[in-house]
Amino acid sequence: MKPFIRIASGQGFWGDLLTAPIVQVRRGPIDYLVMDYLAEVTMSILQKQKLRNPQWGYARDFVETIGEILPDIVAKKIRVVTNAGGVNPHAAAQALLEVARKRGIEQLRIGVVTGDDILPRIDDLIAAGYPLRHMETGIPLASIRDQLLSANVYLGARAVVEALERGADIVVTGRVTDTGLTLAPMVYEFGWAWDDWNKLASGVVAGHINECGAQSTGGNFLGNWQQLPNLAEIGFPIIEAYPDGTFIVTKHEGTGGAVTRETVAEQLLYEIGDPQMYITPDCIADFTTIQLHDKGNDSVAVFGIEGRPATDTYKVSASYADGYVAFGALTYSAPNALERARAADEILRRRLELLGLQYDEIRTEFIGYNACHGPLARIHGEPPEVMLRIGVRSHDYVAVERFGKEVAPLILTGPPGVTGFSGGRPKPSEVVAYFPTLIPKDVVSVEVNIVSL
């Protein structure tokens, strides 16, 4: 058993800093590189891509980035774990193998984890009596079956551990939880039991800190962010994990940003819901038990974490088509910029009414005045310019399309002072709605396959 391992975060979301994994691999020693690409809406986007081209459906940015550093990864024996496989992990693995061949890599083993995509099984599951009800509204999934775009189970770390045990140099998965990507190397390296809840919870907390990339090293930081050094070259977090479940959050020396008690604590509060019940497929972590000690020099020790048994269900992230939206924007200048923008909003709404168009929702924001804080906005004095941003939503495509044709005419038929027409004529785009539900773990079949050069 190694005395400790270093697990580096290389991506916090699909579209994150492309140089981050390169820096993590080349600027200092690491044992694992974990890269998180998936959010709820991402799965539906990838599903649409796969429908257009059966060879797509994964985060192609990942393959391009890894291609650049693959020789370094092989030479340094760094293992990579990522959920960049999206809805097509096998295609992602084949693309990686092709890149490896072009790079002259002679040996590479890729573990492919599948089974999270239950969209092909939905009809059978519904017919078998599984209610698959919305976790908040109680509406059954069957009610939106015809609009369903994707349905993916949040798998945990077990299958990733199996892939590592079978010798995978790179593990590519579908919808494995963000935390599971970091937890898996810890379970594998230290031989933790699947019912050692405190240690598993520690791995989950480590994964939660790693999952959003530089958000734990000073990015998007609400504290004294003005004092953080060199955000242009911000370092991504590294978890230095120990067999007893304790770990240290750090980053490569010389990179920008900072690792402090405050930056780590702020990330710990991100998207956790009930802090005593952070539920994952692997265990339940109690975030109120977390202890932090700032050791200085971009090093924060994390310990004391307690966990509880895992639930007998998986969460399912489903998405479905739910009508159309379009957004238009006009910018008004002073004097009386807000008054002009409000008048334009009233005129446009009245014109849509006179046309007999019906919408599920019309929403207006006055950017520069209330777009961020809504009714709580308070401006002392007159804003020098205001952007009117108005959007409509409807299941009637024609109504949404006609809205787009009514925005530009306001330039010459409405209040004075339009200084810019943003983005051209608004066009309808499909609304992708989120449908969270639960499914018993024993009806989900997870597979691990190894492909290699």
Image (spheres, rainbow, N blue to C red):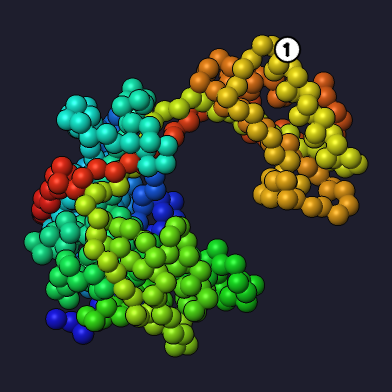
In the displayed structure, would residue 24 be above or below residue 95?
below
The quadrant the C terminus occupies is bottom left
Residue 81 screen position, x and y as percent:
25, 60
In the displayed structure, would residue 4 be above or below residue 33?
below
Residue 176 screen position, x and y as percent:
27, 53
**Horizontal relation, residue 124 to residue 387: left or right:** left
Which residue is situated farthest in the right direction here?
335
**Can I make out residue 300 in this image?**
no
In the displayed structure, would residue 32 be above or below residue 95?
below
Q: Quadrant of residue 21?
A: bottom left
Residue for point 27% across, 66% down: 308
Which residue is situated farthest in the left direction here?
166
As rendered, which of 226 and 447 lies closer to the eye?
447
**Can I make out residue 339 in this image?**
yes
Residue 31 screen position, x and y as percent:
25, 73
Residue 242 screen position, x and y as percent:
26, 81
At label 1, counting other C-alpha atoms closer than 10 Å, the crowd grade (few under 14, some 14-19, many 20 or more) is few
Residue for point 42% across, 64% down: 275
**Horizontal relation, residue 23 to residue 171: left or right:** right
Residue for point 39% across, 82% down: 301
Residue for point 56% across, 67% down: 221
Q: Quadrant of residue 410?
A: top right
**Residue ID for mark 1:** 354
As rendered, which of 251 and 319 lies closer to the eye?
319
The quadrant the N terminus occupies is bottom left
Q: Amino acid at mark 1?
A: Leu
